[in-house]
Structure formats: structure tokens, C-alpha cells
Amino acid sequence: MRHLKLLLVIAGCLAAGAVQVLAQPPSPSGQVKVDDVKVVWSDVGPVVLLTARDAVVPIFVDPTVAGSIHGALTGKKTPRPLSHDLMHTILQAYDMTVVQVGISLKGQVYYGELTMAAGGQTKVFDCRSSDGIALAIHFGTPIFVEAALLEQGRKGQSPKDSQIEL
């Protein structure tokens, strides 16, 4: 029953539209740029919905990360900075930026790949998908997902929430 509710939430989000992620560097091989990002609350907790090519990829996140992503999407500030707000401020102070974020699924674990630039150099860092999404939203940079992951989302074959490791 809760999966049906989540599918209804996802369908509603597709119909309602969401905030667009800015900028468009070239797509990494085998990946698709995310068009919309939303944070919704389900019976099993907060979910980040990544939409691309009319497919939705749900990623279950902890409430703090959900709040950080939601705040970055809406521009609402918390009374005190959250971790991603602090990271954004520190990186900007040192003229560093997030160039893009890639999301993949290996087994039942979502992975993030954070591409950063500073001083003419670009480096890629392993990260939690939710942290990568939060920083991409803070910096207004694109998020990419594997084409195969989108296809699973299009067919409604996302991993069972009980199998996802956060």
C-alpha cells in the first residue's frame, strides 16, 4: 500500500512540475541531465524525486538532508546553517565550485559523484547521493543520473525502500 502512495506522490510531482536545476555542461557518457528535483514526505520518510525524460527516480534521504535540499530549492534559510549551507559557504570563500553531480545505483546503494573545480583544476569525489544533490542545488549546477536508472524509474522498478542503504 505504501508503494502505491509513493507512486501517487511521484505522479503528482510530475504533473505539478518542480524547480529546474541550472546550467548545462556536456552530459557524462551514459547519463541523463535531471530536469526537476522535489522533496516530498512519504509514509516511510522524506524522498527526493529526480525527474528526467518523463521518468522519476526516488531517493530516500534522512530528514536533515531533506530539509537542506528543500531549503536550497525554495531559498528558505534556517536560523542556523545546516551542513550543506556551511559547506557551500566554505567552498565559495575559497573560490571552489561544484561543477556537476552524478547519481548511480550499484546493487541497492545509491552513489554520488561530486565534480568540483578550483584554481583551474577539476576533481571528482565519492559522496552520498543526497549530499551531492544538496550541493548541486546550492551551487545551481546540473545533476546527472544513469540512463539505466531512469529506465528503471520509467518502468516503476525502483529498489524497494527496505533495501536501500542510506
Image (cartoon, rainbow, N blue to C red):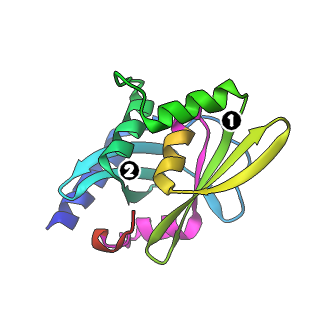
Name above or below for residue 132 compared with residue 106.
Answer: above
Mark 2 and mark 1 residues within 8 Å of each other at the beta carbon: no
> For the residue labelled by badge 2, is the local secondary structure a helix, a strand or a loop?
strand
> For the residue labelled by badge 1, is the local secondary structure a helix, a strand or a loop?
strand
Given the image, on which type of amino acid does mark 2 rest? Val
Where in the figure is residue 75, as x and y percent of width and height? 42, 24
Give the label on residue 97, or none: 1
Q: As drawn, which residue projects farthest toward the left?
A: 1
Give yes or no for residue 140 being in the magenta stretch.
Answer: yes
Q: Residues within 10 Å of mark 1 (few under 14, many from 20)?
A: many
Where in the figure is residue 44, as x and y percent of width and height? 21, 59
Residue 3: quadrant of the picture:
bottom left
Name above or below for residue 48 compared with residue 140.
Answer: below
Number of numbered markers: 2
Q: Which residues are magenta?
A: 137-160
Give yes or no for residue 108 being in the magenta stretch.
Answer: no
* Foreground of the two, 64 or 139: 64
Where in the figure is residue 152, as x and y percent of width and height? 45, 71
Given the image, on which type of amino acid does mark 1 rest? Thr
User: Can residue 20 be seen?
Assistant: no
Q: As drawn, which residue projects farthest toward the bottom?
A: 107
Where does the C terminus fall, quadrant-wise? bottom left
Task: Check disc 2 and report the residue beneath it.
Answer: 48
Residue at position x 14%, y 68% from top? 1
Residue 125: quadrant of the picture:
bottom right
Residue at position x 49%, y 42% from top? 134
Where in the figure is residue 111, as x and y percent of width and height? 53, 63
User: Can residue 156 be seen?
Assistant: yes
